[in-house]
Amino acid sequence: MIGTVYFGLSIFLVGILLMPVLYILESILKFAVSQGLIDNFTQAGKIIVNIAVAIAMLSIFFTFIRIVFFPFFIIDKHCKPFESIKLSLATTKGNFIKLLFILVGLVLVQAVVFGFFYVVVLTGFRLVNYFFDYDINQYVSLIVVVFSSFVIVPFTTAFFAVAYRKIMSEYKGDEHPDIIHNIV
């Protein structure tokens, strides 16, 4: 629980660090409105929101990839929560592209497996609904949730465990790293 709180705080701090970027962006867009490049402040506001959401998503994704292994350090190495985040930052340093490919592979495999299952189940239940005029949407939801809980989540956890073992086997750093040298 404490590790998850630290993870949430990390995401929050990334958001705080992005605030100056938004103020600079706002100034640029106000200048664009005054020069006639953008029609009005409503349009400028929409642009600011879109860019802010994109920046926030990318920074949260980057932070997630760097801190993703903190639960494994708590379980495997019996580290304290903050120490596990420091170790996750240290082990993922220099492995961002590798982790990105692992994550993209995981998403693609899940999309194929879950998508196929969902299409088969949904089609089957729609046919039952069509022929027997019986509303069974709650059953479809139940089956999808059960499938997700008992197949997708364990598969994802196993996938990350394998990635954790692979990256730990290649890690040559300190057993108690400092956080400053491993952030970037």
Image (cartoon, rainbow, N blue to C red):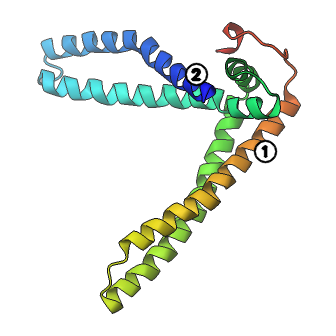
Quadrant of residue 41 in the image? top left
Identity of the amino acid at label 2? Answer: Tyr
Q: Which residue corresponds to the image point at 69% horizontal and 29% vertical from the top-left?
A: 70
Q: Which residue corresponds to the image point at 62% horizontal and 52% vertical from the top-left?
A: 153
Q: Which residue is tagged 1?
A: 162
Task: Report the disc number at residue 115.
Answer: none
Task: Report the disc number at residue 6.
Answer: 2
Identity of the amino acid at label 1? Answer: Val
Query: In the rendered image of this protein, does residue 18 appear above or below residue 168?
Result: above
The percent position of residue 99, horizontal first and vertical second, equals 69, 36
Quadrant of residue 18 in the image? top left
Q: Which residue corresponds to the image point at 55% horizontal and 70% vertical from the top-left?
A: 117
Q: Which residue corresponds to the image point at 58% horizontal and 30% vertical from the top-left?
A: 64
Q: Locate residue 109 relative to residue 146 in the image: left or right.
A: right
The percent position of residue 154, horizontal first and vertical second, equals 67, 53
The local secondary structure at tag 1 comes to: helix
Circles 2 and 1, Cβ within 8 Å, touching? The answer is no
The percent position of residue 54, horizontal first and vertical second, equals 40, 30
Q: Locate residue 157 relative to residue 39 in the image: left or right.
A: right
Quarter holding the C terminus? Answer: top right
